[in-house]
Amino acid sequence: MPTHRLRSWAFVAHLLLAILLVVGCSSAPSEDISMESREYSAGSGDMASKQSDSPSSEATSDSPAQSAAETENSSAPPTSPTANQNTSLTSSPALNRKMIYKADVRMEVESYTASRAGLTKLVTQYQGYILSSSEYESKDEKGASIVIRIPQKGFDPFINKLDDLAVKIPHRSIEGTDVTEEYVDLGSRLKAKQAVETRLLEFMSKAQKTEDLLKISGDLATVQEEIERIKGRMRYLDENVAYSTITLDVVEKKRTASLDDLANQGTLTQAWHAFNSSLIGIFEFIQLLLVFIAAAIPVLILIAIPGVPIYLWKRKKRKNTPPTPPTPPPSID
């Protein structure tokens, strides 16, 4: 009987042990999975903190340029920026367009002097300035070629005001160039280059080897040069957008008498004009003759220096030579 009880208790003990083992095995995988997930998250956090705190071994090799290039690529616009920009520009009517306006105008005036004074006042009124001016005068006309810069808001009113100064405007052309797309592209490139510059400066502050410093300095100088080039182009576009350019030819036609005008004049008036024309012709001939003589005097002096002594020597020699007797006429037998 004691032996049967011992066997019963042993069976119960084995059964309880088996139940505990089954329960333990079923809970172990979940605990292992949770432990592994906690270890993986902790390891990832450590790796992220290490990568953010130090450039590690990549910063001492070719990684600055590669990392900077990755930064530029991530900051650069999409592969096909033209389509995206066009879509945004056309779909957003409030977006300001970047337009460069140029005009070429030829105007005939009654008096060049009076028109030039009026033009100067007009430029001052619209807060512009004269970039260049070249005056000329010929037999038929007198005038100037003037390049004017006017703020874009006053471009159209200024062009319309030229009608008040001119007798006739035979030529007028206006051209506008849309540089919005180029300006947006330059802005995107500038942001990308500035991001690369910031990344290279961070690498430079953490670099310890001289070789690394020299390489990063070279890359940084190239990037900064490109940044300045982009900024210069953007400033050029901004200035040309803000101020429009007008090339203006101001011409005063010199009036000549026509046949109809002469027919309407009296005989005495026509005779007086003919007399004046003859006097003018004589004066012009005398003027040209004096100019010719003044230009010929140096040449005559050069010829006279050796010519005069030779002439005097020949004349003296002719005087010293006895005259030859006349030849007797032939006798006629």
Image (cartoon, helix red, strand yellow):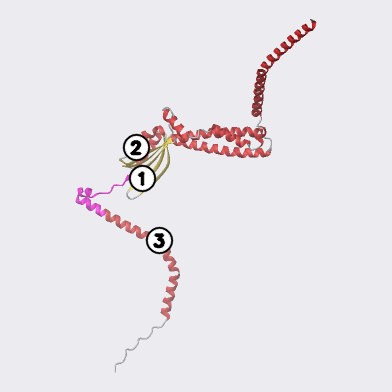
Task: Give x and y (percent) for residue 305.
Answer: 45, 68
Question: From the viewer's perspective, is the residue at label 3 or at label 1 nearer?
Answer: 1
Counting residues from the N terminus, which is met first, the one under dot 3 or under dot 1? 1
State the predominant SS element of the stretch in magenta. helix
Task: Give x and y (percent) for residue 105.
Answer: 36, 41
Q: Residues within 10 Å of mark 3 (few under 14, many from 20)?
A: few
Q: Is residue 238 visible?
A: no
Q: Name, please, the residue furthest toward the bottom.
A: 333
Quadrant hosting residue 291: bottom left
Q: CA distance from mark 3 to mark 1?
A: 32 Å
Front-lying residue, 75 or 180: 75
Task: Give x and y (percent) for residue 68.
Answer: 59, 35
Disc 1 on helix, strand or loop? strand
The residue at which mark 2 appears reads as 162
Please give the range of residues in magenta.
Answer: 251-275
Counting residues from the N terminus, which is met first, the one under dot 1 or under dot 2? 1
Quadrant hosting residue 208: top right
Question: From the viewer's perspective, is the residue at label 1 or at label 2 nearer?
Answer: 2
Q: Is residue 219 visible?
A: yes
Q: Are marks 1 and 2 in contact (CB under 8 Å)?
A: no
Badge 1 amino acid: Gly
Is-magenta flag for residue 322?
A: no
Instruction: Tell me what residue is drawn at x 64 percent, y 28 percent.
Output: 52
Badge 2 amino acid: Leu
